């Protein structure tokens, strides 16, 4: 397999460190005689957001299950800040499509729950969670129940919960897909600012090409049967002209065209 690397044009500049935040080495997975993933490797540097883009059924969620330790691969390994974590759960935070907030718990207790499960006393876990509510645009919601939150606020609460236990990196599986278009756009803008501020290291699954371009430093195309990394695109945002929106710029549309061509190639090949 030949991996192509195409320069699309930003992203947030990410310093390269000697030890990657997350490294996936030669992962292969088969269910019975059906091979799902073959020799999949990828690396995330600290503070980087990489999107995993592919057709439905291409193995993206299977790869996330391997990285999170829910599934042990047939071959390959997963490394977090230089430590091997293959097959070990609880080492890397994983947020699914739905917010998964427990409706009978107040928002602060939902956010603090992973800390409690790790052995932190409830009062201390609450205090640790509560101090970050303002940073995530959730000030004043601590004592509310999830049913009292808007969809965007519920996703922010879920992201805060994920971040609190994320350590070196976190996995996000379609975290914005259930939101309406306007709320999703607003949350994208908020998340871009927040990840730059907090130095979030994120691997994102998405089916949304626009979302991938807008949020990512790099985009990986997963495809084939069995699936492998078929292409890698680096996103570099040009300096925006006054009043120009990157999402409607000619550069953005050029990136989208190239990604569609890459996905068509995966579908056809």
Image (spheres, rainbow, N blue to C red):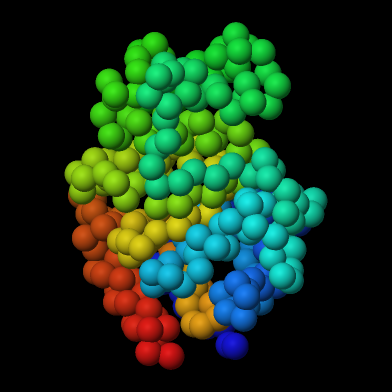
Classify 6 as above or below 109. Answer: below
Residue at the location (29% across, 46% down)?
Answer: 178
Above or below: residue 221 compared with residue 189: below
Q: Position of residue 215 (x, y in %)?
A: 40, 54
Q: Residue furthest bottom?
A: 269
Give the residue furthest to the top.
123
The answer to whether residue 95 is left or right of residue 22 is: left
Give me the residue at 30% from left, 66% from top. Answer: 252
Q: Nearer the viewer, residue 50 or 236?
A: 50
- Quarter occupied by residue 119: top right
Q: Is residue 66 left or right of residue 246?
A: right
Q: Nearer the viewer, residue 26 or 103?
A: 103
Asked if 157 appears above or below 65 in the picture, the reply is above
Which quadrant of the figure has residue 105? top left
Residue 182 place in picture, x, y as percent: 19, 44
Label count reads: 0
Location of the C terminus by quadrant is bottom left
Residue 195 can be seen, yes or no? yes
x and y percentages locating residue 17 in the rendered image: 71, 54
Query: In the rendered image, which quarter contains the N terminus?
Result: bottom right
Q: Nearer the viewer, residue 44 or 163?
A: 163
**Residue placed furthest toward the front:** 32
At which x and y percent is residue 211?
Answer: 34, 57
Q: Residue at x 74, y 63 (%)?
A: 77
Between 247 and 115, the one lying in front of the other is 115
Query: What residue do we see at 53% from left, 54% from top?
Result: 203
Does the image show residue 79?
Answer: no
């Amino acid at each position: 397999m030949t991996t192509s690397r195409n320069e699309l044009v930003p992203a947030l500049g990410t310093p390269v460190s000697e030890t990657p935040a997350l490294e996936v080495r030669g992962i292969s997975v088969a269910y019975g005689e059906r091979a799902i993933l073959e020799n999949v490797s990828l690396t995330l540097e600290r503070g980087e957001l990489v999107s995993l883009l592919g057709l439905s059924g291409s193995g993206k969620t299977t790869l996330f299950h391997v990285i999170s330790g829910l599934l042990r691969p047939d071959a390959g390994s997963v490394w977090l800040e230089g430590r091997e974590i293959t097959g070990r759960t609880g080492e890397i935070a994983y947020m699914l499509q739905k917010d998964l907030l427990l409706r009978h718990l107040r928002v602060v207790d939902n956010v603090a729950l992973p800390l409690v499960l790790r052995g932190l006393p409830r009062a201390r876990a609450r205090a640790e969670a509560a101090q970050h509510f303002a940073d995530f645009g959730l000030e004043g919601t601590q004592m509310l129940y999830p049913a009292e939150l808007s969809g965007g606020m519920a996703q922010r609460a879920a992201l805060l919960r994920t971040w609190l236990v994320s350590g070196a990196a976190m996995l996000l599986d379609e975290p914005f897909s259930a939101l309406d278009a306007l709320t999703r756009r607003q949350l994208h803008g908020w998340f871009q600012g927040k990840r730059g501020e907090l130095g979030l290291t994120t691997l994102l699954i998405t089916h949304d090409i626009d979302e991938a371009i807008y949020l990512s430093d790099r985009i990986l195309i997963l495809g084939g049967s069995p699936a492998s990394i078929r292409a890698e695109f680096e996103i570099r945002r040009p300096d925006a002209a006054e009043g120009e929106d990157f999402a409607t710029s000619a550069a953005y549309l050029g990136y989208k065209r190239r990604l569609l061509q890459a996905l068509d190639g995966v579908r056809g090949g």
